Amino acid sequence: GVLNVPANVGAFPVQYSVEMTAQDKRSQPSTVDGGLITVAPAAPTNELKVAPGSVSFGSVKVGNRASKSFVLRNDAKKSTGSISGVLIPPGAPFFLVGGGLGGIPFTLRAGETKTYTVEFRPTTVSHPTATIAVRRTDNGVPGLAVLLSLRGVAQK
C-alpha cells in the first residue's frame, strides 16, 4: 500500500506510527508494527547567516570594556521575503549594544546585512563563555548563534 502524509510546514520533525494488517486465507487478521515514518520540516525559503560564528575577546582587565562586532545576513535571493526575529542577549558580563533584556528585534530583506556590537565588561577575574541566540519568528534555522568567550584579568 501507499501512505500519504501531509507536508511538514513546522519547524520540527513530525513522526507517524505505522501498523500493517493483513488477512490470511480464513480471513483472520494479523497486525504487525511497521515502525515510524519521520517527515522532516520543510527547508526555510531563505537563509539567515551570522559571521563570525564565534567571538573571542582575549584578555580584558576587570573594570575595562571591550567590544566586538558580528554581522547578521539574509543570503536569500531577491525574490524571497524578509526574515524577522530577535537577538537574545547573553547576560552579564556580555551586553548587546542597543538592546535591553528582551534582546534586539531585526528584519532583514533578501541580501541585506546588519552589524551588531557586543561588549564584555568584566567585574571579576574569570573565563566566562556565553551565546547570543538568533531566533527567527518562523522558527527557521534553529541553533543559529554567536559563541562568546574571553578572559577577565586583574588590574595591574
Image (cartoon, helix red, strand yellow):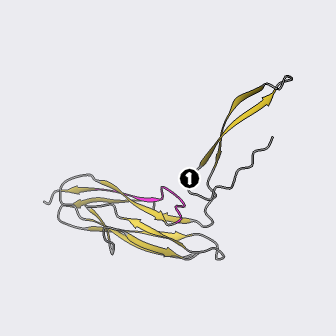
Q: Is residue 143 on the magenta stretch?
A: yes
SS for dot 1: loop
Instruction: Tell me if residue 126 comes above or below residue 36 in the rendering.
Output: below
The residue wearing badge 1 is 12
**Residue sitting at the far left:** 156
Which image quarter is the C terminus in?
A: bottom left
Give me the residue at 47% from left, 69% from top: 85
Q: Quadrant of residue 45?
A: bottom right
Give me the residue at 75% from left, 32% from top: 21
Q: Quadrant of residue 104?
A: bottom left
Give me the residue at 66% from left, 76% from top: 79
From the viewer's side, name the closer residue of 139 and 154: 139
Which image quarter is the N terminus in?
A: top right
Q: With 54 as the anchor, is 80 left or right in this view?
A: right
Range of residues picked out in magenta? 138-150
Q: With 83 as the anchor, is 126 left or right in this view?
A: left
Q: Position of residue 35 (x, y in %)?
A: 66, 35
From the viewer's side, name the closer residue of 73 and 29: 29
Q: With 60 as the anchor, is 31 left or right in this view?
A: right
Q: Position of residue 125 (x, y in %)?
A: 19, 54
Going by the numbered disc 1, the residue's amino acid type is Phe
Q: Is residue 56 on the magenta stretch?
A: no
**Residue sitting at the far right:** 25
Q: Position of residue 59 (x, y in %)?
A: 26, 58
Give me the residue at 52% from left, 75% from top: 108
Q: Position of residue 7 (x, y in %)?
A: 68, 56
Neighbour class for label 1 at 10 Å: few (<14), some, many (≥20)? some
Instruction: Tell me if residue 49 comes above or below residue 35 in the rendering.
Output: below
